[in-house]
Every structure is written in structure tokens, then in C-alpha cells.
Image (tube, coloured by chain):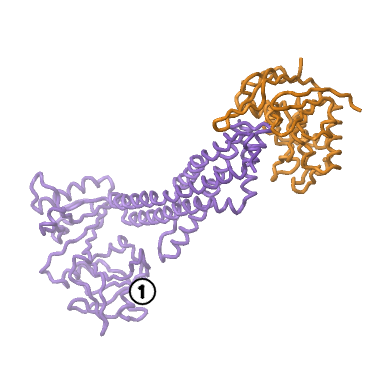
Chain colours: A purple, B orange
């Protein structure tokens, strides 16, 4: 049996090489299919990998608190909030917290314009503290980031992104310049490093004010909804802190027993897994779409194999006359389609990875493509599957030819 | 015992509504080292006889005992095995694998026997030497002359050391000079104790043989032995 397989393999290789260009065209369907799968998967996986890395920046010993409004409440126009009072409460009444970072998200603030001379630009204005530098992974190009005292003394200072500097025609090094936010003059103390774009979204159009300054500037008539990020000294305390925070906020928000929380306390793992779930769904959907192209590729292989069997009818007749058994003919043709598919799969693998790399390189700051082992196994496995499924019919046709008829074939 | 024994054998084909009886209760026996020509006009049952003798086809009635084994009841794979070991085919149109060299063509039957690389090559070279083509081993069929191609085919037939060499109009596609050359080779093989059956319609070819069986309408019309001149 092994002997027969080796001989079939040799003869299949021989035949594929004899029809080089045709073999290439035949496998093109498989090549494109596999390349598409691998390119898609590698890009998504690369993104996932990078996102996970960024969430790791939050630290594993961190918790986030944010408001949560159920759809039902939202339809009734009721919005939940996590307020500065809640922040106060958590920072004074919970033990074991190492750092606490309040973030007034740009969406909830009333401030969204920065002015310099005659220039005005819309931007995302965030209010936070010095610890936001780690959370937001911000690296300075000029000047410094916010300090603790900037917040405690409500200094009128701001850190801006490169995009804001350009829009306002500020000098290369804008540190020391004054811009107008709301009704106040604010001094620029730092310019952060460029981050480029992700999915066409500019990552450098932002300004960060100290948390307390932001509250002053927006006027206290509107209570902002804030996002709180905290780290704690001992990872084993996480559950206890979480329970404590939940209890405090439920009391503060006056939620009765049996009612649901109007906020979420989440670990960074939970944030990551939420994001990963989305990406996994995307991967599966893309994979499904793309496997249709593999199906089409398989039908292409079957088509050519059927043509090849007809074309080689006489050759099959000769082989049968000199003693080839059915399984020997079957195997020869099956190996040929299998080999074609495997070659296509391999070329597609390399091509797809190349495409993934090229695509991720073409988008600035996009994460590098990563091909996971399961995708390689899937691609190769699918190629083998296609080769077998679509090769068996032509091979059986060849094996069942009547030798007399076949020899008579012109 | 005869090498080959056909008893009361018939072969029928269904052609639409009609049943065509290509061989009609034929009985024939061929001895070891016989040198037989099977002749007849077209439609006499020659080709059918060849297919049955060559185990390419099965009889409708009667039986066929080859080398002590009744082959009329075997399945297609068992017949393939018999063709491989007992019969060496030589065709009018050579029927070589066009993409394979002379050597590869001769090795082909040995692959189906499961003979391994080195031994296979040794035996194929030996067979090619036997037909004086040792110096053309690496040529493709289309780089060889008609006579050379037929000699490759003969080497392929001989390489398995078959009981019978079964030739179907072996000189039909050759010019007269090459025909003489090939027939000489058959004569020599016969002298080396090879059993040879040649199916032909040409009297000159038949006259090389020591026994001539003439078929007519599916019957044996004449079966005569002659002494070689």
C-alpha cells in the first residue's frame, strides 16, 4: 500500500509538472481562497493582539467603573451617571486603592472647541489626572504631561495632540502658548507623540485638561458622567474592592434591593474579552464568506481533473492493459488533485500572509499581521478536504474506465 | 497440459435491439512455446478473440483456462493481475506513455507488481538490452522511430516474463523494412522458448508463425500447423 502511494505520488508530481501552466491556473481558485482567508485572519489577529496589549497597559490589577443605562431606561430618556460625588466617595471610603483616575469623556463634556488667534478647531477634550498618561499610553514629544498638582490646584493647562497643533497653526513646539477653551485662556504644557490613524480615524485630535480644571471650565451646571479607572495595591483584594465599590454606589444612587445596578464595575480582563468577542465574530463571518471562494476553487479543480481524465483516457487504457488495478489508477488521480490543492494551499498561505503584512504596513500605525497556527492548519486541512472531495469523482471515473474502450479512444 | 485452453467459448455483444455473437462456441488450445497467428477478415471475431485471450474482456459463455487457472470468472482487479503477470501486450499503435521515457515505459508494468526502484530499473534495462535499445533508454517515444517504439513496447511486454506474448497487428504501422526487423525479433524470441500469439490479417506475417488459426464469422475455420521453411 505504501509502495503504491509513493508511486502514485511520483506519477502525480510528474503529471503536474508536465502541465505546469495549466496546473497553476487550476490551483488559482484555491490559492486565492486560501490567501483571502489567511490575509483576513492575519489582519484581525494582529489587531486583536495589539488591542490585548493595550488593555494590558491598564494593568491586570485594575478595575473600571462606568455608568450603564439599560435600553429600556434609555428609551424612556433616563440616563444613568457616575458622578464626581461617586468618585469622591470611592476615593475616600474604599481601602487598598493605589491610584484612581477619573476620566471625563469628551462625549459627555460641553467643551469641544479650542481657539488660537483667529483659528478654531473642534477636538475631543478629556479631563483627567496624571495617571491618565499610563491608561491612555501617551508619550510626550515636547513639554510634560499633567501633574498631580495641576489637578489639585486647578491649573489652567492643557496637553494637546499633534492634530490639534496643526489645525491651530501652532509652532512646532507649542509649549508655553495660550489657547482658549470655553471662556478661559489655557496654557499648553505639552505636545504628545503622533499616533497616526486606525481605520481612518485620526488618533491625534485630542486635548487633555486636568480633571478639576475641566469641571470648572464646563461650569458646574451640568453634572458630568465620568469613567473611573483604578488600580489597587494587592491583586487579592480585587473581589473585596469590587464588592465594596458596588455597595457604595448602590447606596449612593439609592438603588433598592432586587433592582439592577445602573453602573458597571469591570476588570480589564472583562473589557478585553468583550472586545475579543467582537473580533471573533468578525473572524468567523469573514471566514465563512471566504470559504465560499474555496468551494469555487474546489469545483475548478474537479473540472480540470475531469478534463484531464478524458484527455488521458488512452493512457489509462494502456496502464490497465499492462496490469494497473483500479485502486492504483484511483490513487494516481486522487493524489494529483490532492497535490494540486496542497500546492495551492501552500502558495495561498504565503501569499495571504504577504498580503496581510502589506495591508497592515500600508495603514499607518496598524498592528503587524499575525498568522495563528490554527489558521495554517485550517487552510491546509481545507485544501486537503477540497482535494479529496473534488478529486474523488474524476479519480473514480478514471478507475472505472473499461480498458478496451479506453484503448480504442482517440 | 496446454498453456492456454478455451472450451466452447462464446462472446455476445448487445447492439441496440440486436445481439451480436462475435465468437460462437470456439474451442482452442495453445501449447507452451507455440508460435500462433490468428487471422481472419475484419468482423471475423479476431479482435474479440484478442480481448478474451488478453484477459481484457470476459466471455459470455464457456471457459478460458490460462496456465492452469480458470480466468473466465475473475473480477476486473484479478484480471488486471493476470494481465500484468501472464500476458505481454504488443499493439499496432505501440501504445507507449507519451510523457515517459523508454526506460520509464518499460518499468511501468513492474510498478504494478510492486517491484522496487533498483531492481525495477535493472530488469527494465535488461529488457531494453534484449531488444537492442540499451542506448535509447532516456528518449521519449516521439524521439524514436516507429521500429524503435515497437521494440520499446516489446521490451515492456517482456519485462514481466509473461507466459504469452500477445501481439495485435504488431507491424501494421511500420514500413516493410522495419516489419522484417520486428518479425525477426519475434522469431528470435520464439527460439528462446517464448509463447507468441500474433493477431494479424496479413498473410506474410502469419507465415512467420508455425501455426495459423483462421477465424470466420466467430468460428475457427482453419487451424493448421506448418513447418518453418
Instruction: Name the subunit of mark 1.
Output: A
Q: Position of residue A157 (x, y in %)?
A: 25, 74
Would residue A56 be found to the left or right of residue A37 on screen? left
Q: Which residue is mark 1?
A: A142
x 83%, y 32%: residue: B186
Task: Point out the residue furthest to the top here.
Answer: B1
From where the camera sits, is residue A223 visible?
yes
Q: Examine the rendered structure and indicate whether residue A289 appears above or below residue A116.
A: above
Percent x, y of residue A272: 31, 52
Q: Which residue is at the front of the view, A380 or B48?
A: B48
Disc 1 element = strand
* Residue A361, image x, y percentages: 45, 63
Out of B112 and A143, give the one closest to the viewer.
B112
Provide residue A186's location: percent of width, then percent of height. Answer: 23, 77
* Quadrant placement of the C terminus of chain B: top right
To which quarter of the image does residue B166 belong?
Answer: top right
Q: Is A45 positioned to the left or the right of A339 in the image?
A: left
Which quadrant of the view contains residue A1? Answer: top right
Q: Nearer the viewer, residue A276 or A401?
A: A401
Q: Is A161 above or below relative to B48?
A: below
Relative to the observer, which residue lies in front, A346 or A227?
A346
Q: Is residue B103 above or below residue B54?
A: below
Is any atom of residue A61 visible in this view?
A: no
Query: Does residue A60 sit above or below B83 in this rendering?
Result: below
Q: Residue at the right extreme? A: B229
Number of numbered markers: 1
Q: Quadrant of the N terminus of chain B?
A: top right
Tell me what residue is drawn at x 53 percent, y 49 percent: A344
Query: Badge 1: few (under 14), some or many (20 or more) residues near its Cα, within 10 Å?
Result: some
Amino acid at each position: 500500500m505504501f509502495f503504491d502511494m509513493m508511486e502514485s505520488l511520483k506519477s502525480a508530481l510528474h503529471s503536474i509538472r508536465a502541465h505546469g501552466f495549466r496546473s497553476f491556473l487550476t490551483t488559482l481558485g484555491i490559492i486565492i481562497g486560501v490567501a483571502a482567508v489567511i490575509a483576513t485572519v492575519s489582519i484581525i489577529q494582529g489587531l486583536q493582539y495589539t488591542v490585548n496589549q493595550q488593555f494590558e497597559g491598564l494593568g491586570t490589577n485594575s478595575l473600571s467603573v462606568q455608568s450603564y443605562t439599560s435600553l429600556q431606561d434609555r428609551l424612556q430618556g433616563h440616563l444613568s451617571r457616575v458622578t464626581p460625588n461617586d468618585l469622591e466617595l470611592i476615593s475616600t471610603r474604599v481601602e487598598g486603592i493605589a491610584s484612581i483616575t477619573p476620566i471625563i469623556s469628551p462625549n459627555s463634556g460641553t467643551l469641544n472647541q479650542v481657539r488660537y488667534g483667529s483659528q478654531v478647531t473642534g477636538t475631543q477634550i478629556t479631563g483627567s489626572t496624571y495617571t491618565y498618561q499610563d491608561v491612555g499610553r501617551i508619550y510626550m514629544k515636547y513639554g510634560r504631561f499633567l501633574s498631580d498638582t495641576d489637578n489639585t490646584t486647578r491649573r489652567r493647562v492643557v496637553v494637546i495632540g499633534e492634530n490639534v497643533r496643526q489645525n491651530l497653526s501652532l509652532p512646532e513646539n507649542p509649549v508655553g502658548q495660550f489657547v482658549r477653551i470655553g471662556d478661559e485662556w489655557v496654557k499648553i504644557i505639552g505636545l504628545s507623540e503622533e499616533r497616526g490613524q486606525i481605520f481612518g480615524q485620526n488618533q491625534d485630535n485630542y486635548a487633555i485638561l486636568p480633571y478639576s480644571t475641566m469641571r470648572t471650565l464646563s461650569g458646574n451646571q451640568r453634572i458630568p458622567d465620568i469613567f473611573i479607572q483604578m488600580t489597587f495595591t494587592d491583586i487579592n483584594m480585587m473581589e473585596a474592592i469590587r464588592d465594596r465599590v458596588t455597595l457604595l454606589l448602590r447606596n449612593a444612587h439609592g438603588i433598592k434591593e432586587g433592582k439592577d445596578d445602573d453602573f458597571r464595575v469591570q476588570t480589564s480582563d472583562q473589557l478585553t474579552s468583550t472586545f475579543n468577542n467582537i473580533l471573533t465574530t468578525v473572524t468567523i463571518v469573514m471566514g465563512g464568506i471566504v470559504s465560499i471562494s474555496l468551494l469555487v476553487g474546489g469545483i475548478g479543480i474537479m473540472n480540470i481533473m475531469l478534463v484531464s481524465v478524458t484527455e488521458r483516457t488512452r493512457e489509462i487504457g494502456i496502464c490497465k492493459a499492462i496490469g494497473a488495478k483500479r485502486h492504483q489508477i484511483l490513487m494516481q488521480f486522487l493524489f494529483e488533485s490532492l497535490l494540486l490543492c496542497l500546492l495551492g494551499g501552500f502558495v495561498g498561505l504565503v501569499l495571504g500572509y504577504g498580503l496581510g503584512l502589506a495591508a497592515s504596513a500600508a495603514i499607518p500605525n496598524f498592528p503587524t499581521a499575525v498568522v495563528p497556527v490554527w489558521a495554517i492548519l485550517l487552510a491546509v486541512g481545507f485544501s486537503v478536504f477540497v482535494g479529496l472531495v473534488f478529486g474523488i469523482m474524476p479519480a473514480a471515473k478514471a478507475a472505472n474506465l473499461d480498458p478496451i474502450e479506453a484503448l480504442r479512444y482517440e | 497440459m496446454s498453456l492456454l485452453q478455451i472450451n466452447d467459448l462464446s462472446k455476445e455483444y448487445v447492439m441496440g435491439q440486436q445481439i451480436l455473437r462475435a465468437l460462437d462456441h470456439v474451442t482452442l488450445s495453445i501449447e507452451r512455446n507455440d508460435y500462433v497467428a490468428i487471422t481472419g477478415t475484419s468482423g471475423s471475431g479476431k479482435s474479440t478473440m484478442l480481448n478474451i485471450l488478453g484477459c481484457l474482456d470476459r466471455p459470455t459463455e464457456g471457459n478460458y483456462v490460462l496456465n492452469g487457472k480458470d480466468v473466465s470468472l475473475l473480477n476486473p482487479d484479478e484480471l488486471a493481475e493476470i494481465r500484468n503477470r501472464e500476458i505481454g501486450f504488443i499493439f499496432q499503435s505501440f501504445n507507449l506513455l507519451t510523457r515517459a521515457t523508454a526506460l520509464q515505459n518499460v518499468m511501468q508494468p513492474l510498478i504494478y507488481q510492486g517491484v522496487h526502484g533498483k531492481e525495477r530499473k535493472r530488469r527494465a534495462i535488461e529488457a531494453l538490452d534484449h531488444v537492442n535499445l540499451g542506448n535509447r533508454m532516456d528518449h521519449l517515444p516521439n524521439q524514436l522511430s516507429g521500429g524503435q517504439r515497437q521494440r520499446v513496447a516489446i521490451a515492456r511486454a517482456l519485462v514481466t516474463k509473461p507466459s504469452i506474448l500477445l501481439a495485435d497487428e504488431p507491424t501494421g504501422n511500420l514500413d516493410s523494412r522495419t516489419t522484417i526487423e520486428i518479425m525477426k525479433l519475434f522469431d528470435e524470441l520464439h527460439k528462446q522458448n517464448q509463447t507468441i500469439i500474433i493477431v494479424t490479417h496479413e498473410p506474410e506475417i502469419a507465415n512467420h508463425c508455425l501455426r495459423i488459426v483462421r477465424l470466420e464469422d466467430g468460428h475457427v475455420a482453419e487451424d493448421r500447423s506448418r513447418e518453418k521453411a
